[in-house]
Amino acid sequence: MKLKLTIYFSIFILASPSFFVSAEVLKRRDEPASTVLEKRSGSPHYEHHAAPPKMDSFAKPSNYDKTKFKSDPVYPDKPYDVEAQVQIYGGKKAVPTARPWLELGHPLYDEGPFGKGYNLIGRKNLVRPQLTVYGDFRTALAYNDNGNAEVGQIATRLNLDVDLKLTSTERLHAFIGPLDNGNRFTRAELFGADKDEDELIFDGVFQTFFFEGDLAYIQAGLTDEYPKYDLPIAFGLMPLFLQNGIWIEDAFVGFSAAIPSRNSPKLDISNYDVAFFYGFNEVDTPAIIKANGELDEHAADIMGVTWFADVGRGHLETSYGYLDDTRDANGGFDYHSFIIGWTKRYKGKISNSVRFLANFGQEPDNNSIQTADGYAILLENSLITSKPSFFVPYFNFFAGFDRPQPFARGGTGILKNTGINFETDGLTGFPKLTDNPQDAWGGAIGIFNMFFPSGSIVFEVAGIFPYGGESDTIPGPEIAAGVRYQKNLSHQWIFRSDAMISHRESNENQQGIRFELRYKF
């Protein structure tokens, strides 16, 4: 009872301002926090982070002569009209912005030139420290029946990002979720046939903690010479997001480096990047699981390379990785993973993205069943309407053969981006269709409609159909209909609601509805 009262009271305190603040109310940006230390003079004479400007030998500076300038025009018969001036720029006005919970050093949002940095590691890589703490607070009331459990609950989670900027290119970053642990969230279960005990969770373990920077500019600071290359690097418990999260969406202990912003006129490549990564702990992969069915995040090393290119008026992304099963006993689940994706618009009518993913080379010990050996084709399509940012009909399809798996993802399959009926909410355990196409095909057809300027709604039907009526992991066809509504209540508050219902031929049917308030800071 105390836990319920605590959660209810916190929701009331956090949500009450949203009923009095409208998204249509315009105000000036919030003032910087009192912890902001840096004051800017507004003078153009500040220390540059780039090379001094060069002047042609035939040119020379001229002296200022005020007689060369006339006074501003005056129109006494036409008084100054503020609203008319705003309309000149399409009615655009100042956008309110939320301040981080904590700001130390220079402010996150401010006008004018940056203030002077500190010459601690070299004048060509000045130190300008800034510490910010920001994130969001999510609370949802939901009724979920996923076929195995029926629960009505209220759950909450707090996402905190801690960012320490050191220079213009180097920083330390950490993420923590103090009110959740893995897939368990602080919650009060209110009703339902499978109602369980309430749970208050406090977990102070960092979910990411890494250094990120540019080795070239670190070298520039130490040698006092401008670099002729860029080499971004990162190491630590770092997140990686590749192939739109389909291939990798995970945080693991390791390091990565990239060769960015190259081009090839001969091959009509306007821009390409090459990135390398290696992970040796905290690797979440559905290919390696414990005896109890949980992911074993300490049993695999991964390494790989990915290549992005803007070529042929489209975007090409291809990636290769190798997973090494490091277990001494009951191992042998090593495998290779390859994925290639191509995205392009055609004749201004349709936007298409096609991806091919393949896992191969897995030979488990003791004749165990393969967990990652197969391939999948994913097609994502949307029509380009007269309002391409506001009204988007989409139709996505997939086909999987054998056991295709993402390279590194915790708890979700490769169909997460196919449609809203294939994704859960990361909070209450909202029901979803099977999200990995093991010997199955299917798709999602829907409409996204945004109500300018602060709301949107999505309608979708989706399904997954195993070949021959069933597969090893999908006992029968599954069909679902879902709807999602979202509205900005203010520049910090978001309201979101989801509802879905599914029919599963060989499993219990699913249904769910949820209402969520999200506070961003």
Image (cartoon, rainbow, N blue to C red):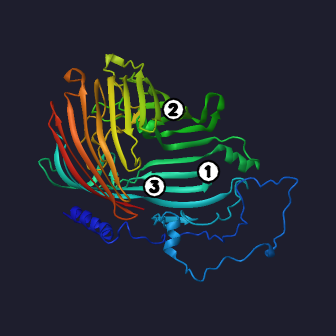
- Return the residue at label 1: 169
Q: Secondary structure at mark 3?
A: strand
- Return the residue at label 3: 161
Q: Which label lies toward us, 1 or 3? A: 1
Q: Amino acid at mark 2?
A: Leu
Q: Residue furthest front?
A: 77
> What residue is at 70 percent from the left and 54 percent from the top?
121
Give the Cα separation between the discs numbered 1 and 3.
18 Å
> What residue is at 18 percent from the left and 63 percent from the top?
1
In which image quadrant can residue 146 be found? top left
Q: Residue furthest right?
A: 58
Q: How crowded is the residue under tag 2: few (<14 C-alpha within 10 Å), some, or many (20+)?
A: some
Q: Position of residue 37 (x, y in %)?
A: 59, 69
Q: From the viewer's side, name the closer residue of 266 and 232.
A: 266
> What residue is at 28 percent from the left and 64 percent from the top?
11
> What residue is at 31 percent from the left and 55 percent from the top?
486
Q: Residue furthest bottom?
A: 76
Q: Is residue 349 visible?
A: yes
In which image quadrant can residue 383 be found? top left
Q: Secondary structure at mark 2?
A: strand
Which comes before the other along the chain, label 1 or label 2?
Answer: 1
The mark found on residue 13 in the picture is none
Q: Quadrant of the C terminus?
A: bottom left
- Return the residue at label 2: 316
